[in-house]
Image (cartoon, rainbow, N blue to C red):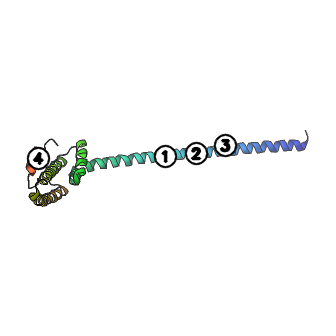
Amino acid sequence: MSDDNKDLGNDLNDMLDDAKDNARKAGDKISQKANEFSDDAKEFGRDAKRAADDFGNDAKEVFSDGKNVAIIAHITFIGWIIAIVMNSSNKTEFGSFYIRQMLGLVLIAVVSSWIPIINLIMWLVLLIAWIMSIIAALGGEMKPTFLFGKQFQEWFKGL
């Protein structure tokens, strides 16, 4: 072989060796970056799990006192149904108290709506009773309504 061909062959071998070294270095960098990304992803996962646990604990704390159930029970008939569902999973005395109170007020409203002359007067009395009840619920007090509050607790004790 001629010297030119030997030099060309050596140059090609050097280039191949350089390409192999560069490919190895690139592979090492990719591996290093993948490991860093994996570590970051694991840390993010741990942070997300901690945040989800904190949120779950906060949600349990909010629903455990029954105050939310009591307030929701005052907001229309659909709110009362939602309050029953919420209270059934985590029954509290406070929530149950106001669910019974609101059921009693709603039943009196339905019955009094059939009597024409008493209807308007009863609606005003029931509005006042409802306002007093929601104020007591917001204040965290279990005050029976002035109409039949104590009887509502006896009649509907299954709720």
Q: Amino acid at mark 2?
A: Gln
Q: Are marks 3 and 2 in contact (CB under 8 Å)?
A: no
Q: Mark 4 Cα within 10 Å, few/some/many (few <14, many 20+)? A: some
Q: CA distance from mark 1 to mark 2?
A: 14 Å
Q: Mark 2 Cα within 10 Å, few/some/many (few <14, many 20+)? A: few
In the rendered view of the protein, which quadrant contains the N terminus?
top right
Residue corresponding to mark 1: 41
Q: Nearer the viewer, residue 144 or 152?
A: 152
Q: Are marks 1 and 3 in contact (CB under 8 Å)?
A: no
Q: Are marks 1 and 2 in contact (CB under 8 Å)?
A: no
Q: Nearer the viewer, residue 118 or 148?
A: 118
Q: CA distance from mark 3 to mark 4?
A: 79 Å
Q: Position of residue 113 (x, y in %)?
A: 14, 54
Residue corresponding to mark 3: 24
Q: Amino acid at mark 1?
A: Ala
Q: Provide the secondary structure element on which disc 3 rests.
A: helix
Residue corresponding to mark 2: 32
Which residue, as the protein is rendered here, is positioned at the far top?
Answer: 1
Query: Which label is found at residue 153?
Result: 4
